[in-house]
């Protein structure tokens, strides 16, 4: 089971609404996708995949707008590559 499936099932059991936003559409800047991401009550972002550095930017925009419920996940599969993401 993928993490997004697990989280989605938790939201559904609690009568919440869970949406998955495809990275390529968010990165491309599709207006409806940007609005969905920016207006979400909670954002759960997986930074494990390479080439998705702009996700940090989008989370930063949410944070600057006062949207404090942002969760960033990172699977440490290669410590040499993920060292820059670790909190000191």
Image (cartoon, grey):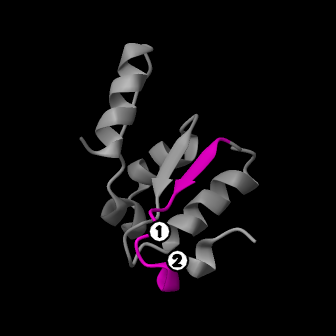
Q: In terms of image quadrants, where is residue 48?
A: bottom left
Q: Of the residues under marks 1 and 2, which one precedes in the sequence?
A: 1
Dot 2: within a 10 Å radius of its alpha carbon, few (fewer than 14), some, or many (20 or more) residues?
some
- Which quarter of the rendered picture does the N terminus lie within? top left
Number of the label disc, if any, that sits on residue 82: 2
Residue 11 coordinates in the image, percent (x, y): 42, 24
Q: In terms of image quadrants, where is residue 17?
A: top left
| Drawn side of residue 88 relative to residue 79, left or right | right
Magenta segment range? Answer: 69-81
Check contact, mark 1 vs mark 2: CB within 8 A: yes
Task: Report if residue 70 lies within the magenta region.
Answer: yes
Kindly identify which residue carries mark 1: 76
Residue at position x 39%, y 34% from top?
A: 7
Residue at position x 70%, y 68% from top?
A: 87
Taking depth in this image into account, of 23 and 84 the one nearest to the observer is 84
Residue at position x 34%, y 34% from top?
A: 6
């Amino acid at each position: 089971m993928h993490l997004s499936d697990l989280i989605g099932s938790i939201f559904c059991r609690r009568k919440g609404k869970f949406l998955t936003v495809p990275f390529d559409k968010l990165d491309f800047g599709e207006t409806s996708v940007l609005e969905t991401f920016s207006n979400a009550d909670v954002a759960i972002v997986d930074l494990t995949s390479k080439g998705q550095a702009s996700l940090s930017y989008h989370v930063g925009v949410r944070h600057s707008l006062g949207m404090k419920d942002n969760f960033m996940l990172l699977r440490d599969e290669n410590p040499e590559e993920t060292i820059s993401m670790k909190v000191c």
